[in-house]
């Protein structure tokens, strides 16, 4: 098992995400002495008796003044058993777009729920995001249990709510842990105040939980980012014939001599060489950045894709997808956008809005537009073929962005549901 785990925190405003992260950093001795002194000084200036550990992650001035998290804060910490990259995501509905960003690469999402309030609309939204982004593991930390006197019945009631909502989104790997981020109960060590809870503390679970499936287990996919024709070829005859295709392997493994296909043209060829800054390789795997040489002289450009010959996906001009709408202005049918998929950016039109996710019923309701933070199902036509795959098959080849052509602002994060668009089908919010 890899020693590196990527995790993200989410939840509603004031559920204690930043405090929990601060507690993890503090109790694992992952903060510098001067950082802790600064936090203690600011806390004392506010009249607090103890250090406000949330200040360890809320670094923006506006965050500290308002007492909320606005942007995603990335932190790194380690224990003797594992290293972690942590994304502390905002809880306010206005910043759901930041939560989508922080959760998109996570192996685990830690969702906080205030035991006094139970499951709220934003809790449902974050569980929906976890489902749509196919985050492999979900941990629900039922926080502030000290404020209800560690009452077992109250905690079990919230656990039941969480289980029902998670099941509605098709989430199967969900673990609940009662915690007090402020006091440290069940965060790093198990608490004597919760004898009814027999599971591990949060950090214990994070150290044990397996990583997501490795991209090397998927089929070989290599989006071309740049065509290399060294400038030194003008003075070095040995480089005159060099043509390499640089990029990052999105998934799978490639070896010298492998038969591959160049998409979307479908031209077959063979890998002649694999080059890196440190020298040639015989084999490379995701997510390495390499330059590939081919045995045939094929005209490739940025956005083309080199794939395993025996599993080449069918290029498509139309996709059925889920999107998290991130822009202030609503999305309406007929909207012209840019679609960025791997290294390929292409003009596109949103031809149809099928349904919007109803966070109360957990089902789809007909919609004529999508507003800020809405999650909906759409159909998109692109001006030139893209080599996309269903998000359920590949998180890397099934993800895309919608971009405003004039401002270059990101409008939506998308997940491909299907590349075979025929007759409309019932919405299934479980990807």
Image (tube, helix red, strand yellow):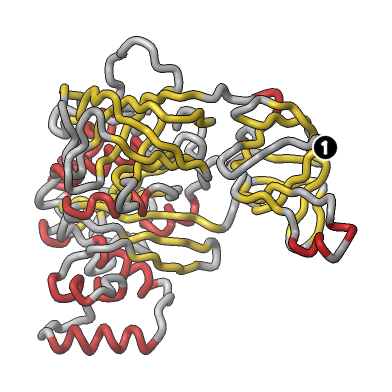
On screen, residue 213 versus residue 367, left or right, reads right
Is 164 situated above or below 204? Answer: above
Residue lying farthest right?
238
Whether residue 174 can be seen here: no
Residue found at x 15% / y 26%: 368
The spot of residue 328 in percent (x, y) is: 18, 48
Q: Secondary structure at mark 1?
A: loop
Tally of numbered discs? 1
Q: Position of residue 203 (x, y in %)?
A: 41, 59
Is 54 placed above or below 198 here?
A: below
* Residue 427 is at least partly visible in this image: yes
Residue at (34%, 52%) from the top-left corner?
A: 408
Asked if residue 280 lies left or right of residue 249, the reply is right
Q: Nearer the viewer, residue 127 or 381?
A: 381
Relative placement, left or right, of 412 versus 279 is: left
Q: Quadrant of residue 333?
A: top left
Q: Residue furthest front?
A: 234
Q: Nearer the viewer, residue 60 or 81?
A: 60
The quarter of the picture where the C terminus appears is: top left
Question: Is 362 displayed left or right of 425 in the figure?
Answer: left
Q: Position of residue 189 (x, y in %)?
A: 37, 64
Which residue, given by chain and number where applicable, does mark 1 sit on? 295
Determine the residue positioned at 28% across, 40% down: 324
Graded by Cα atoms within 10 Å as few (under 14), some (14 to 19) or many (20 or more), the crowding at tag 1 reads few
At x 32% / y 61%, what residue is drawn?
72
Residue 45 in percent (x, y) is at: 14, 89
**Depth check, front residue: 146 or 59:** 59
- Residue 83 drawn above or below residue 99: below
């Amino acid at each position: 098992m890899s020693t590196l785990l990527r995790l993200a925190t989410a939840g509603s405003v004031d559920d204690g995400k930043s405090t929990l992260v601060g507690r993890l950093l503090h109790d694992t001795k992952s903060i510098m002495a001067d950082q802790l002194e600064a936090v203690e000084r600011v806390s004392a200036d506010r009249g607090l008796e103890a250090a406000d550990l949330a200040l360890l992650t809320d670094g923006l001035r506006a965050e500290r003044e308002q007492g909320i998290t606005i942007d995603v804060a990335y932190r790194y910490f380690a224990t003797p058993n594992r290293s972690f990259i942590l994304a502390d995501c905002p809880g306010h509905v206005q910043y759901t777009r930041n939560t989508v960003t922080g959760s998109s690469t996570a192996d685990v999402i830690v969702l906080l729920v205030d035991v006094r309030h139970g499951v709220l609309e934003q809790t449902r939204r974050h569980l929906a995001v976890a489902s749509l982004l196919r985050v492999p593991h979900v941990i629900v930390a039922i926080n502030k249990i000290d404020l209800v006197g560690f009452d077992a019945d109250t905690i079990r009631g919230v656990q039941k709510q969480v289980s029902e909502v998670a099941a509605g989104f098709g989430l199967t790997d969900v673990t609940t842990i009662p915690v007090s981020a402020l006091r440290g109960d069940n965060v790093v060590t198990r608490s004597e105040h919760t004898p009814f809870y027999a599971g591990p503390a949060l950090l214990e679970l994070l150290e044990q939980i397996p990583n997501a499936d490795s991209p090397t287990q998927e089929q070989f996919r290599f989006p071309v980012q740049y065509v290399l024709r060294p400038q030194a070829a003008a003075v070095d005859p040995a480089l005159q014939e060099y043509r390499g295709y640089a990029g990052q392997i999105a998934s799978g493994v490639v070896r010298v001599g492998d038969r591959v296909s160049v998409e979307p043209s479908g031209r077959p060829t063979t890998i002649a060489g694999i080059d890196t800054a440190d020298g040639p390789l015989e084999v490379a795997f995701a997510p390495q950045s390499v330059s590939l040489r081919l045995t045939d002289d094929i005209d490739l450009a940025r956005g083309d894709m080199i794939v395993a010959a025996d599993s080449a996906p069918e290029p498509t001009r139309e996709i059925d997808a889920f999107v998290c709408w991130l822009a202030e202005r609503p999305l309406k049918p007929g909207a012209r956008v840019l679609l960025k998929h791997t290294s390929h950016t292409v003009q596109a039109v949103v031809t149809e809005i099928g349904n919007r996710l109803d966070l109360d019923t957990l089902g789809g309701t007909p919609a004529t537009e999508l507003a800020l933070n809405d999650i909906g199902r759409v159909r998109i036509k692109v001006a030139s073929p893209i080599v996309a795959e269903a998000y359920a098959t590949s998180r890397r080849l099934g993800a895309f962005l919608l971009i405003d052509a004039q401002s270059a602002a990101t409008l939506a994060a998308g997940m491909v549901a299907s590349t075979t668009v025929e007759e409309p089908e019932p919405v299934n919010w479980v990807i």
